[in-house]
Amino acid sequence: MPKCGTQCILCDFPVRFDTFSGCRHACEYCFTRRKLDKNIGTEADISSSEGPISLRSFIEGERKGEVAWVDWDLPIHIGGMSDPYQPEEKEKRRTFECLKILAETKYPFIISTKGRLAAEKEYLDIISKCNVCFQISLVSPNYNKLEQGAPPFEERIEMIKKISKVVPRLNIRIQPYMIEELNSVMEILLPKIKEAGAYGVTIEGMKAWKGKLPGMEAVGGDMCYPTWLLEEHFLKIKNRAHDIGLGFWSGENRLRFMGDSLGCCGCDDMEGFVGNKYNLNHFYSGENPQPTEAMKKIGTTICFRSLCQAAWCGDVLDQLPFDLMMREIAKSEYGYTTMGLEIDNRKLNTFDIRM
């Protein structure tokens, strides 16, 4: 069954589906090294994860576990924790089999990759039949040394040219962004991807978990660039993107308001892409999102389990509905600090927090 986890408190499209666990690309900055607690990159570290059976069950309406609160065709995100087009796919074809189901059902989804397999003919043919927002991660030619297991910068530009011709939308993930790459992003990346057929960009700052980079500070459990510094850089990149006809979205939770919409994937205006707006971004922006019927049901809070480490927490969560848990998080210090907001500036009257 697809997973969700605590991304639901922040993200409009938090349901992830990974055909593999581990990734051969072994990018040096990869956050899944920490989350999965293993040295990703060797064949021994790659294993199969979700497959066609669980995907079809989800599409046909089976929603349990971390996704029990989802009672509409919420688009899934393929490639959140592992690359679906990594080298293992050529032999195992797990992603291809799932794409066949998605092409058949026209179920909306986002797929993120750096993998060269995505630009091969049979994969182009199958993705052309899908309702998909395609994402390719790309920042700068200088990242080649950090992404030695992935196709280099220029090869990914060629991939964009091929894939953008057959999908409804292709966006570029400028993730993770390092401040030293501002000029490279402005003068090399943006013009090249526009010419190659990209629709827009989504950007998020680098987060360090082994030491820190110059200019970083502690934010929660990560070392991050300060908000004011990222805002300066994002504004320049946003203006440049708009000048040449690219959309712009912010994957940085603290700066979601800078995007062309609050969603960070750049697909919330696509047909069939109805996201979950019952989250902190929409609460704190002054909107008044309403829960669905499934969100009001007891036992739909398993996705919050990692937020509560105490032994008794699981029993308590089993007795709560999703909507109540979300509203409690929205009133908490955790909610505000997660979004980079000052506790003294709470505006709890911007949404209905009553039972």
Image: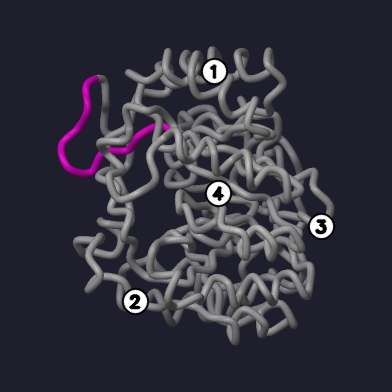
Does dot 3 land on a helix, a strand or a loop? loop
Residue 238 sits inside the magenta stretch: no
Q: What residue is shown at x 40% (from left), y 78% (from top)? A: 48
- Foreground tag (3 vs 4): 3
Q: What residue is shown at x 52% (from left), y 71% (from top)? A: 3
Query: Along the line of sight, which residue is nearer the eye, 272 or 131?
Result: 131
The residue wearing badge 2 is 47
The residue wearing badge 4 is 10
Amino acid type at image mark 4? Leu
In the image, the segment drawn in magenta is: 204-214
Q: Are marks 3 and 1 in contact (CB under 8 Å)?
A: no
Q: Determine the CA span between mark 2 and mark 4.
A: 28 Å
Instruction: Looking at the image, tell me whether mark 3 or mark 2 is earlier in sequence order.
Output: 2
Residue 301 lies in what quarter of the image? bottom right
Residue 197 lies in what quarter of the image? top right
The residue wearing badge 3 is 272
